[in-house]
Image (tube, helix red, strand yellow):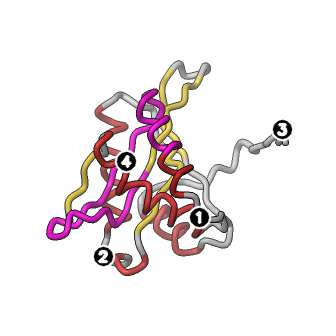
């Protein structure tokens, strides 16, 4: 397996696994929408995507997507690790851990303050992985969300 940063040439293959990720979270399949969404993020430099690529087949079997954010208080950039997904048949091989390591390395290299993520309280496997990877559950701040629709 090879972990690398995605580029515009990867959008077609990446759209397929991105669509599978969205379906994992209960969304209906929408390859056209997935492609458009990923192209837009790349064209506008709004996200950084790392992928796990099978060295033999060239298939993308996992990915993580980071979004840059800024803190006015610390006056630093951080990244939201918004998406992390590995195809079912490739799980338990350390790929999620490798993708997280790449995200951490990217954050350090780019002088980021850190990585923030959220996951479902029911996703026990992911929560265990994040704890092993030194992510600490936030206890000081509450998160609120306003829904416009």
97 in relation to 41, above or below: below
Instruction: State which quarter of the image contains the C terminus.
Output: top right
- The region drawn magenta spans 36-64
Residue bearing the label numbered 4: 11
Disc 3 marks which residue? 148
Q: How far apart in space, not on screen, are marks 3 and 2 (Cα)?
A: 40 Å
Residue 127, by quadrant, is: bottom right
CA distance for labels 2 and 4: 24 Å
Sort mark 3 into few (<14), some (14-19) or many (20+) by Cα contacts within 10 Å. Answer: few
Disc nearer the start of the sequence (4/3): 4
Q: Provide the residue designation for mark 2.
A: 93
Is 56 covered by the magenta stretch? yes
From the viewer's side, name the closer residue of 73 and 61: 61
Q: Residue 13: x, y in percent? A: 35, 57
Residue at the spot 50% in from the left edge and 66% down from the top edge = 20
Observer-side mark, 2 or 4, equals: 4
Distance between mark 1 and mark 4 Cα atoms: 16 Å
Asked if the stretch drawn in magenta spans residue 77, the answer is no
Report, in whole angstroms, how far the alpha carbon at label 1 lies from the one at label 3.
Answer: 23 Å
Residue receiving disc 1: 29
């Amino acid at each position: 397996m090879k972990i690398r940063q995605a580029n515009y040439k990867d959008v077609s293959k990446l759209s397929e696994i991105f669509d599978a990720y969205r379906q994992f979270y209960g969304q209906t399949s929408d390859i056209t929408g997935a492609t458009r969404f990923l192209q837009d993020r790349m064209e506008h430099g709004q996200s950084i995507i790392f992928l796990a690529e099978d060295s033999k087949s060239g298939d993308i079997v996992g990915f993580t997507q980071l979004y840059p954010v800024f803190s006015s208080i610390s006056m630093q950039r951080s990244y939201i690790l918004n998406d992390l997904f590995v195809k079912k048949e490739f799980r338990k091989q350390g790929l999620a851990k490798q993708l997280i390591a790449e995200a951490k390395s990217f954050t350090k290299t780019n002088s980021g303050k850190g990585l923030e993520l959220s996951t479902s309280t029911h996703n026990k496997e992911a929560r265990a992985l994040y704890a092993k990877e030194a992510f600490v559950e936030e206890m000081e701040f509450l998160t609120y969300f306003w829904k416009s629709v």
